[in-house]
Amino acid sequence: MSTTYEAVAPLLVVSHITVRFGGLKAIDDVSFNLFPGELLGLIGPNGAGKTTCLRSITGVVRAQEGSVTLDGQPLDGLAIEKRIRRGLALSQQLVKPLRHLSLLENVALAAGSAKTASPLASLMHVSESAEQARALELLRSVGIAERADQLPGTQPLGVLKRLEMARALALKPRVLLLDEPLAGLNSKEARSLAETIADINRSGVTIVLIEHNLGEVMRICQRLVVLDNGRKIADGEPRAVMNDPVVRAAYLGNDTLAESAAPEAAHA
Ligand SMILES: Nc1ncnc2c1ncn2[C@@H]1O[C@H](COP(=O)(O)OP(=O)(O)OP(=O)(O)O)[C@@H](O)[C@H]1O
């Protein structure tokens, strides 16, 4: 994709964020922009601060310094629910659907809660056909519509991850934050889910993707931000970033880079 993002106002601005856990600086003065329509990869070695960065954007973790703005509106100090209502959705590493509800009902519940403030009212929404139809459409968009009536307990991990994505999309997010969606999948499943993520992005959803599968990251992301030891060490076009000696040094000894994201093996 050859969008010139600099000509467009950023949708999300992360500005000089610092997060400390006791004496540890998990995030150290990190800034980056996310532009409308982008699929941005947030990468870095283990413990680099990627998840903490996403959590500080959604308010799960409070940054001691810095600010986050969505469409020009500061999110600082807002509770998680308010940030969700402003348009952020976080799809987590751990998949936790409601076990007694079908896949369709799980997504319909999320679609209902996007429209209502109270959990009881959102439960009642499950019976409404509009939410059911929308939930089915969302299940279709993540490729699991044929399992709509099945329970989560019988599903393989790949399906549960797609369900989690559909639930996040039900919130109609302006920015979808995905934390390691490909973890635990084999290479074929990972390739397929990465394609689904790219499809979701092409349908107009702006995405930040944390992922260790650098082969898929290189294939689907339009830009990469790299963290190492809590600091941003690179920000730019994927191939240029992966060729950056500073990035290569950060990953030195990390087999993932050598095996799946050598620049010569990367797709354009
Ligand atoms: N709640 C917490 N309390 C204390 N330290 C934490 C907490 N959450 C994260 N950390 C520490 O902050 C640092 C960054 O962790 P984080 O999980 O953000 O990294 P990451 O890049 O997402 O790592 P990984 O790729 O391994 O998931 C690590 O040193 C981690 O141990």
Image (cartoon, grey):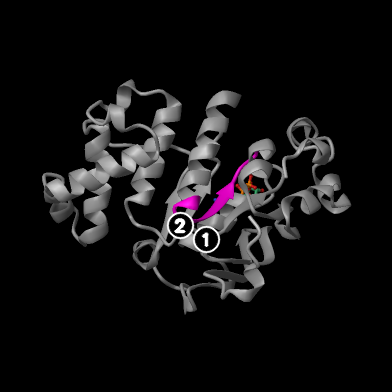
Task: Say above or below: 255 vs 133.
Answer: above
Q: Nearer the viewer, residue 23 or 38?
A: 38
What element does badge 2 sit on?
loop
The residue sitting at 32% across, 37% down in the picture is 97
Tag 1: residue type? Answer: Gly
Q: Is residue 207 magenta?
A: yes
Q: Which label belongs to residue 138?
A: none
The residue sitting at 26% across, 51% down in the picture is 111
Q: How many marks?
A: 2
Q: Pointer 1: residues within 10 angstroms few (<14), some, or many (20+)?
A: some
Q: Quadrant of the N terminus?
A: bottom right
Residue numbers of the magenta segment? 202-212
| Relative horizontal placement of residue 100, taking residue 174 as reference (left or right) | left
* Outermost residue, right side: 245
Quarter of image, res 159: top left
| Relative horizontal placement of residue 36, taking residue 149 as reference (left or right) | right
State the image coordinates of residue 197 (x, y, percent, origin top left). Answer: 50, 43
Report the Cα–Cα distance between label 1 and label 2. 6 Å
Identify the residue position indicated by label 1 in the image. 37
* Outermost residue, top side: 154
Q: Quadrant of the C terminus?
A: top right
State the image coordinates of residue 206 (x, y, percent, origin top left). Answer: 50, 58
The residue sitting at 56% across, 75% down in the picture is 9
State the image coordinates of residue 202 (x, y, percent, origin top left). Answer: 49, 51
What element does badge 1 sit on?
loop
Q: Is residue 113 magenta?
A: no
